[in-house]
Image (cartoon, coloured by chain):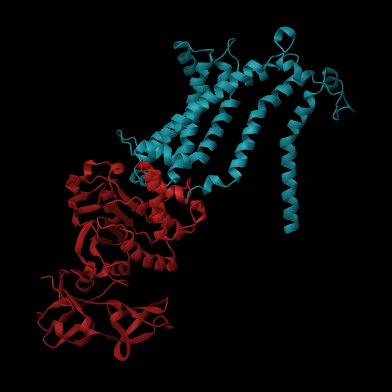
């Protein structure tokens, strides 16, 4: 029984690993191929089946005038939009979450839970519902096709995530901790940044990670709200897939665009495995 | 110069958390607030600390209106029943936190912290993380932080309740020493607990609280000897004082078809119906006694608690040895009639073996 269990366990783990890793291996190997090795026959092993080349990677930084695809600018655009929107979302979201967790709000029939739900409900709607309002809104204030416009839209998308995660986190931080800080001579603001915030770093990291991931992978709004002036990475990568697809540079750019998330995941995983997330407070 | 509360009421929902509570706490004294859970002890302490604002009533300290002063300027110290420390700081930083907040000089801080660490017996633990400490040690850190502040009002909210039995005993002993050594003459110490034994050991002025109301105030001995009503008698005894409905006539005390000789202190009592009170420790096993049925027998430490039943009356008897009983077995017990209390039908104390009455 236990042998069968062990066998099945490893079988599924292996299966899943292959399932997840295979596309990456495919992308890595394709990014080093040229036109010949992609289109003529099936090739697997570098130097034996095909001659590896860096051409797929080189075109990423060449300007279109020289036959390249130039993802450098969209890359930095993406980094700027994601980081700015995430940072603002975390700052505002954390403050909102703290207020929702610690103070009691009453407005008609609206209570704290309703306000929290209102934040989350922003993510329940399919994005397409929001696309037209956003489009009209941005065009009215003249921020269509601009980085700032995208930052504004992304804050709307990311802040609910930050609020949601941080409300849950703050609810698990005993209220007595804030009270002790008050008794020990902190005013409410000092209690927040001297005591509550330092003990919320695990929550902040998780919220930040989710904001960065959701901001970074968004294609829909980046596609709809930009045209020629500004391009974000996901749009640029997908745009490579045209009538004649350059599979090698598509693979390379896909890998480059996934890289930051993998780095984020490794950093966060390290932090989480320290056991700090749940064990920070009794 | 005292901490005076007048007619404090706090009613955040349907029920009163504090109902017309008044007090006058003098400097250099120890006050214990005795009450069951949810009786309003924590609410009262939080109100004094300034974490809650009462709906009605006033609090003044050193002739100033305390309610107008925000928490962070009141200079009180509080230890919670949960072990609340700052998890991101080590032991030393935890204790310095309030002192740095008050911008004391580094020399002064070092001196105060070392002193507090010595008082609570945590010298050598300065650089430990809070999470590495046991529950008892965590509570000591919280206490050290409160002592180091040298606050004029020190509030301890059931500080021992979350500790295991042995630690509780040990820390309770130390508390008595800490309170006599570690506190200055102008500190008001207010200690809340559910445990009557703690109240008796700390031996301060007691306030008995129930459902937000003050039932009785007085020295611990007075509360023990002359509980002003049945509720106080229940709250201030563990196990709670037994109550037997019965009557007195010219010859005997009668309850549940049992007749007892009238003890001396009942001699002048009117002949009528009473609620008789008797402590669990004043009931003894006796071959010639009255027959009761065992409902439950608990062994606690070196004692046995017998839950007994006869007719409509239920009793708890404390037997000072470990004995095994079967449930539904019959035992014979004897009452120490000299330790009987009489409460009227309005539940107020009429006569006590220690001579107190409450009209």
The residue at the point 56 percent across, 34 percent down is A209
Vertical position of residue B199 compared to residue A263: above or below: below
Question: Is residue A100 visible in this depiction of the protein?
Answer: no
The residue at the point 19 percent across, 48 percent down is B62
A239 vs A259, nearest the viewer: A259
A182 vs A204, nearest the viewer: A182
The percent position of residue A170, horizontal first and vertical second, equals 44, 41
Give the chain coloured cyan.
A
The percent position of residue A94, horizontal first and vertical second, equals 45, 34
The percent position of residue A251, horizontal first and vertical second, equals 74, 23
With B269 as the anchor, is B33 left or right in this view? right
Find residue B168 and report its image quarter: bottom left
Question: Is residue A264 visible in this depiction of the protein?
Answer: yes
- The colour with which the image depicts chain B is red
The residue at the point 38 percent across, 37 percent down is A190
The residue at the point 74 percent across, 15 percent down is A59
B151 vs B5, nearest the viewer: B151
Vertical position of residue A81 compared to residue A100: above or below: above
């Amino acid at each position: 029984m236990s042998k069968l269990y062990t066998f099945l366990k490893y079988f599924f783990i292996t299966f899943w690993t292959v399932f997840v890793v295979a596309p990456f291996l495919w992308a890595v190997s394709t990014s080093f191929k040229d036109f010949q090795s992609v289109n003529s026959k099936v090739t697997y092993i570098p130097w034996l089946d095909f001659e590896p080349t860096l051409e797929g990677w080189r075109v990423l930084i060449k300007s279109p005038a020289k036959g390249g695809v130039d993802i450098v600018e969209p890359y930095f655009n993406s980094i700027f939009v994601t980081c700015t929107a995430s940072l603002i979302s975390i700052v505002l979201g954390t403050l909102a979450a703290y207020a929702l967790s610690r103070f009691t709000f009453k407005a008609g029939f609206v209570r704290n839970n309703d306000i929290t739900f209102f934040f989350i409900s922003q993510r329940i709607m399919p994005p397409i519902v929001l696309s037209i309002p956003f489009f009209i809104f941005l065009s009215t204030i003249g921020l269509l096709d601009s980085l700032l416009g995208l930052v504004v839209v992304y804050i709307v998308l990311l802040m609910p995530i930050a609020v949601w995660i941080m409300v849950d986190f703050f609810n698990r931080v005993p209220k007595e901790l804030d009270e002790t800080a008050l008794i020990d001579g902190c005013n409410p603001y000092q209690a927040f940044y001297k005591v509550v915030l330092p003990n919320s770093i695990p929550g902040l990291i998780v919220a930040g990670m989710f904001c960065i991931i959701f901001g970074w992978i968004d294609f829909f709004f980046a596609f709809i709200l930009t045209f020629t002036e500004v391009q974000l990475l996901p749009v640029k990568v997908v745009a490579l897939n045209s009538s004649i697809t350059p599979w090698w540079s598509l693979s390379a750019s896909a890998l480059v665009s996934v890289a930051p998330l993998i780095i984020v995941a490794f950093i966060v995983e390290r932090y989480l495995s320290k056991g700090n997330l749940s064990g920070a407070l009794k | 110069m005292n901490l005076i509360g007048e007619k404090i009421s706090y009613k955040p929902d349907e029920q009163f958390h504090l109902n017309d509570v008044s007090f006058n706490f003098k400097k250099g004294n120890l006050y214990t607030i005795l009450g069951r859970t949810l009786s309003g002890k924590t609410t009262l302490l939080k109100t004094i600390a300034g974490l809650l604002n009462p709906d009605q009533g006033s609090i003044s300290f050193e002739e100033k209106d305390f309610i107008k002063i925000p928490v962070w300027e009141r200079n009180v110290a509080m230890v919670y029943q949960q072990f609340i420390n700052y998890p991101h700081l080590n032991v030393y930083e935890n204790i310095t936190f309030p002192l740095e907040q008050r911008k004391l000089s580094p020399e002064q801080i070092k001196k105060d912290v070392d002193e507090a660490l010595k008082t609570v017996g945590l010298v050598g633990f300065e650089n430990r993380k809070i999470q590495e400490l046991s529950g008892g040690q965590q509570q000591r850190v919280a206490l050290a932080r409160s002592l180091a502040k040298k606050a004029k009002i020190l509030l301890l909210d059931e500080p021992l309740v979350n500790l295991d039995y042995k630690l509780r005993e040990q820390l309770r002993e130390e508390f008595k020493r800490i309170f006599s050594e570690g506190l200055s003459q102008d500190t008001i110490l207010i200690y809340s607990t559910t445990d009557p034994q703690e109240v008796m050991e700390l031996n301060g002025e007691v306030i008995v609280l129930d459902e937000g109301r003050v039932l009785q105030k007085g020295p611990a001995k007075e509360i023990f000897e002359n509980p002003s009503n049945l509720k106080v008698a229940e709250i201030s005894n563990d196990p709670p004082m037994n109550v037997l409905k019965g009557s007195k006539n010219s010859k005997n005390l009668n309850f549940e078809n049992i007749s007892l000789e009238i003890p001396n202190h009942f001699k002048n009592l009117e002949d009528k119906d009473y609620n008789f009170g008797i402590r669990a420790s004043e009931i003894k096993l006796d071959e010639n006694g009255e027959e009761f049925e065992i409902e439950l027998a608990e062994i606690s430490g070196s004692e046995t608690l017998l839950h007994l039943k006869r007719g409509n009356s239920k009793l708890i008897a404390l037997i000072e040895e470990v004995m095994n009983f079967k449930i539904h077995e019959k035992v014979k017990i004897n009452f120490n009639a000299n330790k009987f209390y009489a409460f009227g039908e309005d539940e107020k104390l009429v006569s006590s073996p220690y001579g107190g009455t409450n009209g």
